[in-house]
Amino acid sequence: MRRLLLPLAAAILAAPAGAQEEAPPPAAAAPELAPASVVARWTADEARQGVAVDARYFYPMTNNRIGKYDKKTGKRVAQWEGPRALYPHMNSCLVDGAQLVCAASNYPTVPMASAVEFFDTATLRHVRSVALPPLPGSLTWIERRGKDWFAGLANYPGDHGGEAGHDHRWTAIVRLDAEFRPTGLWHFPEDVLAQFAPMSNSGGSWGDDGLLYVTGHDRPELYAMRLPEAGTVLEHVATIPLPTGGQAFSWDRSAARVIWSLDRKTKNVVASRVPVVAK
């Protein structure tokens, strides 16, 4: 028996390091689709962080201000402004029924803290505020999906308002229940993180096709993502060039495959049609 074991032990010892546990193969590169085509373009003074949209109006916003504009004429019909001490950094808003649901944080202050602010779309009156429990990142967008909420948690280098030891690689998507308690968390694949660097995920919203679409801080690109069948890393399905650079956006649920996004430098708000993504 000893003679049989010796050759086997020698073979194991001679095997190259890591031979018993190989690294997983890299994921196939996601395709880049045709660019989104511009449908409408307007200028709005509040076009700095993100834009929400419903059937009749679009709502650009920045930190402590929200505008309400007619989609057909581009004319502003209402505006809200809150004290900067209470609203230091609202990063995005999305329309949920008759309310604007806005992702807010204390960026660039650390430690990071986040809240969800609710506004009446008819009057832009502030309705309520929900302070979130400590999360591993700064809230940049949030959207209801069924009974749950999905949200983007941004992380940055320390010199960009991040916490020590965390950079863009810690960017994540968190799932919350109806009471805003975390129930799941996913990270981004390396190829998308490389496009975010050195900043993070600024916008996100679920498409009618069941894919999650996200944007970074600067690059004029929209990334179609899928929750993984297993594990904790999102699947990158496709990249779509945009006519605007990064920041938060919204799907126009009243039009097929149309999103509204903005360009910080020009204060343009742009509606563009996104090509269909093969799943």
Image (tube, grey):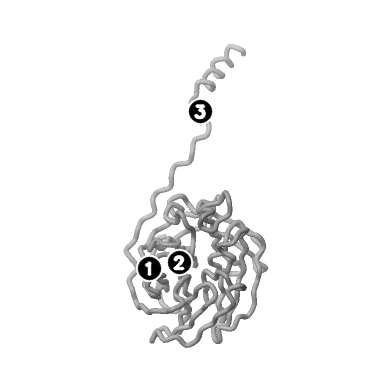
Q: Taking the image as drawn, is residue 62 in sight?
A: yes
Locate residue 40: give its quadrant: bottom left
Judging depth in this view, the residue of 28 and 63 nearest the camera is 63
Task: Give the amino acid type for the residue marked by disc 1 in the picture.
Answer: Thr
Q: Residues within 10 Å of mark 3 (few under 14, many from 20)?
A: few
Locate residue 90: give its quadrant: bottom right
Which residue does the image show at 39% across and 59% down from the upper left?
239
Picture coordinates of residue 11, whole percent (x, y): 52, 20
Q: How many marks?
A: 3
> CA gap, disc 3 to disc 2?
44 Å
Residue mark closest to the camera, 1 vs 3: 1
Label 1 belongs to which residue?
A: 244
Which residue does the image show at 57% across and 49% down from the upper left?
165
Picture coordinates of residue 250, whole percent (x, y): 46, 72
Label 3 belongs to which residue?
A: 17
Task: Give the amino acid type for the residue marked by disc 3 in the picture.
Answer: Ala
Residue mark closest to the camera, 3 vs 2: 2
Task: Give the amino acid type for the residue marked by disc 2 in the picture.
Answer: Gln
The answer to whether the residue labelled 2 contacts the one labelled 1, judged by CB atoms less than 8 Å apart, is yes
Q: Taking the image as drawn, is residue 144 in sight?
A: no
Which residue does the image show at 46% across and 59% down from the upper left?
225
Q: Residues within 10 Å of mark 2 (few under 14, many from 20)?
A: many
The answer to whether the residue labelled 1 contacts the one labelled 3, judged by CB atoms less than 8 Å apart, is no
Label 2 belongs to which residue?
A: 247
